[in-house]
Each structure stands twice: as structure tokens, then as C-alpha cells.
Amino acid sequence: MKQACSKEKTKRHEKIHAVDFRPVQFGIRRIKIWAGLFVLTFLIAACRQSSSKISYPYPFMDPEKPLEERVQDLIARMTLEEKCSQMRFNSPAIERLGIPAYNWWSEALHGVARSGKATVFPQCIGLAATFDDSLIHRIATAISDEARAKFNIAQRLGNRGQYAGLTFWSPNVNLFRDPRWGRGQETWGEDPFLTSRMGVAFVKGMQGNHPRYLKTGACAKHYVVHSGPEKDRHTFNALPSKKDFFETYTPAFKALVQEANVEAVMCAYNRTYDWPCCGSKYLLQDILRKEWGFKNHIVSDCGAIMDFHLHHRVTKSPEESAALAANSGVNLNCGEAYLYLAEAVKKGLVSEKTINENLAILLRTRFKLGLFDPPTLNPWHALGEEVIECPAHVALAREAAAKSVVLLKNNNHVLPLSKNLKNLYVIGPHAANVDILLGNYNGISKNMVTILEGIIARVSPGTSVNYRLGCMFSQPTINPINYAIGEAYGNDAIIAVCGISPLIEGEEGESILSAEKGDRISNMRLPQVQIDLLKALRKASRSPLILVLTGGSPIEMAGVDTLADAILYVWYPGQEGGNGVADVLFGDASPAGRLPITFPVSISQLPDFNDYSMKNRTYRYMQEDPQYPFGFGLSYSRFEYRQISVSKKEITSRDTLVVQATVGNTGAVDADEVVQLYTSQKVEGLECPKYSLKGFRRIHLKAGETRQVAFSLTPEQLKLVNNDGEYQWIPGKVTITVGGASPGKRSLELGAPQPVETMIELK
């Protein structure tokens, strides 16, 4: 073969050199090169000359002009009515100025929502359970990629309607102060620090880091002191102490403003300190604008401004309500109140100067999104359908689903299951249920993987798998014959997929099986029909019973936990939920999710739902032992915390403290561990949190591996909030605890590793 190739090469060489054309070819090549360079130089010069001569109908359309100059030029060309129209969420076109219509209302809580095809990631409370802010940033980056792609396609279709824009009213950084709140599933849990870190990571991923353009606009909602009850959200008046207000309810909003430069803040429906949140100068001007330095736009929750006169009764007409909101600094109205804004100006209730100032802030967002520039100038103009639900995003959804799973119980190491079982029985109302994958404020996927499908895809083709619904979600079984129980006998394992769903927890108007408008004020138990099913299964079979629970909030487990050999809490795990849960069930992933909210034993441990005091609430102030503590979750491996050291034993308010702890995987399984740092300080005359999370790190350790994990604590993190709501450096001793769950005997009773502790002194 080599010889034949050599002969052919020789023949070609002889033909080429029979007549030597090289001098001619070289000359022609030189002429072509010089001609090409001349043409290229001419074209570049022509383009530059042409570019310098581009004339725009109006200066605000010129992308080379400074942002503020463009904003002011546009405002100067509008009539009063046009200005007010642009302050409504469904801003109409101004055809005479070449301004297209824009709808500000889009959603992206855990994936681009309510807008057709998109990757559906686990619900936020499940993402919080990952304790992995780098994962949240990757997810938000994927969401914003899909958002830009969908926007590009929608623009070509001429779709400028609701949910087709680039301003997303996410994330929800309200504190999940009470486990009965139906919308708690949208949040990052009950801890201000965890909520802040997850929220900052999400906003940065959504907005990108381009020096000129926003990738999308994110929104911190609902500002502020807003977490139920849903039935009273249009009327209630939150009156927390100043200590609780600044220690618990505002830190996440402050972090998103000052660290993530969030593009929007949404003011809530309720009143806080007697004034509607969207009409409170104290909240919107004194704190948000002046104290925190927020420069971007404020949007009302939908209908919140009309609540001023309809429910809060602080105004008497739509014009007065619109004026109060505008004078308080609300730049954008979701609802109908700003239909009356121009009339409010004419009546002297608000000045046109105030309208101009509010509109200028709002328009900056549209300019930063590139909505008035040629699309090719922004770096995401070429994103298309190829990124929507692409393989990388689907894989990310699966990773997140697996990482969010919390192992609450694993008697006798029942889990992980073998993939080569002879007989497996899958039962329960949520095993084949698509709705429990989604949560609320969700997108839609063409590839939803139920938990049943994930299990079937994982076991051996030789495994006999039987599936029965077993019971309805909440309605009692009417038929006197139920084969499901009899078929439980004789299996190697039973997987029961039960729990709650968005039918009974969520937002007012969405949870159609809830008698309490989406909250679970009077009942946090599993539906009785599911409890009866589990009891019947336990009675009928001695096979290992694995309980997989879905939900967006805590479930009372007393009486249920004793029925199952193992319990997994899987939240609302997204489109890849079935695969992610199966990864954990069959050992392809070791569970390392941690509870971002305390599971109480029962409702009797909780204070009045309407009381916004933090007394006896969350792991930070709860006095009784819970069923499952904040930060708790088991693993298929074992971890040991061996030593802790600090950079200084005595520090001043000018010092940053470095804390180091050694963590070892002493088990036989490679696994993730969530290393958590808590502080505790007691001060006479001040009710301090029992413990406060100040750092967390999700790490992967191979079996037998040991690693040193370091945390930095700033002076600000070591300050306490006094009774006047002021952050104060208070000298005294501080206990620092590093472990795999929140400190306390209950964590140890359930199997969490022994933490390590040290003490420092604040001077």
C-alpha cells in the first residue's frame, strides 16, 4: 500500500514539473494578494465612513450616546399620557417614536416559566436543600441562556406579550418563617444567610457580567415581611420588632441589592408598620434607596396598588393610590392603578417631575437590556432553539434533582437498593404523577421523567416490577376491593411514592384542593388516605419499605416515620426528578441534601401563624426539639469532624477571622458532605439566636479522604442585631461550631456526625 502511494505521488510530481509555471504562478498570486488588500482597505474605510454617517431618527436610538443622555432624550419626546403608559407592566407601543410594546411580566423561578418549552429545574426549596450556591449560579446561567433564546425567537414571531420578555420576577427571597405558608416552596428556606447566598448566586447567573448589557433583569420579591397567610395578604399589617425586621426579614434583600445589583425589587401586597409596602417611603426610600443605595427600578406586586383603597383603606380612589405609589418611588405598576396616573398628575396629586424621575429609572432597564439597540450588539443575539432544553441543561436538571434529595432515615442500610432485585413493587399516588415534578411558577418540558419511569430505567431488565396507584392523592378509596395491598407481599423491596402536591400548597388561587387558599394552617399531615396505605403495606409485607415523599414544605412525620425503613424527601424535583431520585435510590449518587427548613413534630410546636415575631420560630429561636432539624440529612457514607482551628482567639471589629476544620470520609462510599459553620453568642438583656448559620460548603470526598475546609468570618458577620434593629459589635465570647447539621442533640440522635467546636472572644 505504501509503495503504491509512493508511485502515484512520483507521477504527480513529474507532471507538475514537466513545465515549470512557478514564476508565473507566484506573480499572479502577488497581484491577487495586493488587489485583495486594496479592496479590503477600501471596504473598511467605506464602512467607517458609512458608520460615522449613520443618522438615527432620534438621539435616544443612537447606541454610541451615553445612557443617561438617551434616557432623557426619550422622556423629553413623550407626552404625559405616554410617560404614564410606559410605567405599566404591559407598556404599549409608541409608534410615532418607534418604541415597540413591551410586557415586563415574565417568570423564571426555577426555569423559564409559563412560556412553553423550557428546562424545568427542581423547585427553589429543593435547590436550597443542595446547599450549593455554585450549582445555583450554573442553573441561573442556563435559565438566562434559555430566556435570551426564547426572547430572540419570540421577537421574530412578533410575540411581545406576557411571559415573552427579558425581565423576570424572580427570585423570591422572602423568609420561610412558618412551615404552613403555601408559597414557602418558592423560597430558599428559613435562614437569612442561606437565602442570601442562594439569592445572590441566582441573580448573578440571571443578569450576567457583561460591562454594558444585562443578560436578563432579575427581581427580588416580595419586599418585605411577607410570608402568609395567603388569605389575608391583601389586608394584613406586619408589625415585627425592629430586631426581627433587620436580623431576619431584610438581610436577603439587602444582599441582593448590594452584592448582586439586582435590577428590580418587587414591593409586597401587605402593610408593614401600618403602611402598604408599595406606598411606604420608609421601606422604599429611607431603607431601599438611601440606606442600601438601590439605583434600579421598583415594581408593585400585581394589584397591590389598587389594594391601597380597596383593602388597606389608606386612600380613597385609584388616582390617590396611583399618586401615593408614584410619590413613594414605585416605577412600574403590575395592575391597573397607573391607568389613573395621568389623571392624578392633572389633579395635582403627583408632579410630572416625579413621573419623569420614576420613568427615567425604569427606562434605564430597557436600555441596559439592549431593547432600543440593534440586536446584533448584545452578546446573546445568536442564541436560539438549540440551547432550550439542550442535553447540558437536562443533565444539570438531573444533577440538581439528585443533589436536592434529603435522606431522613435509613435503617439497617436498606438504601441503596440493588439494581438486580428479583421483585420490586412501586406504589403510591405520586409515582407516575407529573404535577409533583413541577412545583409552581414552572415551565413545561417535553421530557418529563416521573419517579416510576426513573426507577424502571434503572433496574435490571430481568427485574419484575409491579406498579399500582394504591390510593388517590387525598380522596378515600370507595371500592371495597384493592388489589394493591395484596400484591405487596413477596417483593424484595417496596417503594411507596407519597406526599403532598401543589394542589394543596401554593399561592392564593392556584392550590385548588386547599381550603386555606394555599396555606396548610390547620393540617400539616399526609392526607389520611396515604397514611392508611402505608399502614396497610406495613401490615401486609415484611419487605423493606422505602418511603419517597414529595412536597415543598415540612410534613408531620409522627406515626409515619416508624412505618418505613428508609425515607427520602425529594421536594418537587423538576423534569429530571425521576432520574435524579433513582440515582439516589440505586446508589449512583450518595444523598447529601440538607433540610433548609425545620420539620416540627406537629403544629402544636408552632406559634400563631399570623404573628411575625421570630420567637420560637425556625432553628434559630425554636426551643422544643423538632422532628428533623435544619441542616440535617444522612449519607450512604460516614463523615468525621476531627479538629477545628481559628486564626485568632481574640479579635476586634477590624479583624477577619479564618476558621479551619478537618473533615474525613470514614465510610466506604465516595460522597458529598455539606460542611456547615454556626456561631452562638449570649448577651444579657438581648434575645440572641441559639445558633446562626454563617458559612457552608458542599464538598466531595472519596472514601478514606480527608480535607481541611476553611471559612472566613467578617466583622459584620459577627455582629448582633440589638433591640433597636442596629448591627452592633458586642464584646464577649462566641462559640463556633462546624459540622454536618445544625448543632443540637436532635441532629446527633438522628445520625449526624459529632461536630467540632471552639470559642473566640470579641474584644
Image (tube, rainbow, N blue to C red):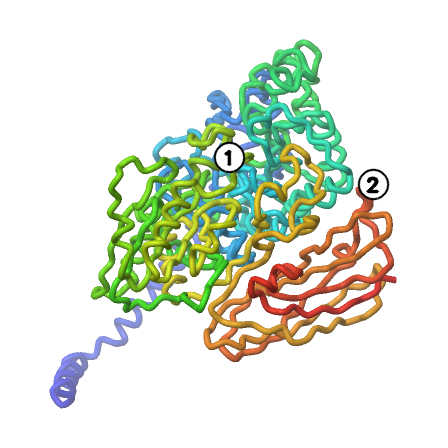
Q: Residue at x 46, y 53 (%)?
A: 569
Up-down: is 611 above or below 207? above
Quadrant of the image occupied by residue 293:
top right
Front-most of residues 712 and 312: 312
The 10 Å Cα crowd at callout 1, few under 14, some 14 to 19, many 20 or more, is: some
Quadrant of the image occupied by residue 22:
bottom left
Front-most of residues 392 and 582: 582
Front-most of residues 576 and 615: 615
Looking at the rendering, in which quadrant would you find the N terminus?
Answer: bottom left
Residue 544 x, y percent position in the rendering: 37, 62
Residue 372 numbered tag: 1
Front-most of residues 536 and 321: 536
State the separation of the CA atoms marked 2 and 1: 46 Å
Give the number of the mark in front: 2 or 1: 2
Q: Residue at x 52, y 70 (%)?
A: 700
Residue 54 x, y percent position in the rendering: 49, 37
Looking at the rendering, in which quadrant would you find the C terminus?
Answer: bottom right
Amino acid type of the residue tagged 2 in the rendering:
Asp
Up-down: is 292 above or below 105? below
Residue 429 x, y percent position in the rendering: 34, 44
Up-down: is 623 above or below 108? below
According to the picture, the residue beneath numbered tag 2 turns out to be 724
Does 9 sit left or right of 80 as displayed? left
Amino acid type of the residue tagged 1 in the rendering:
Phe
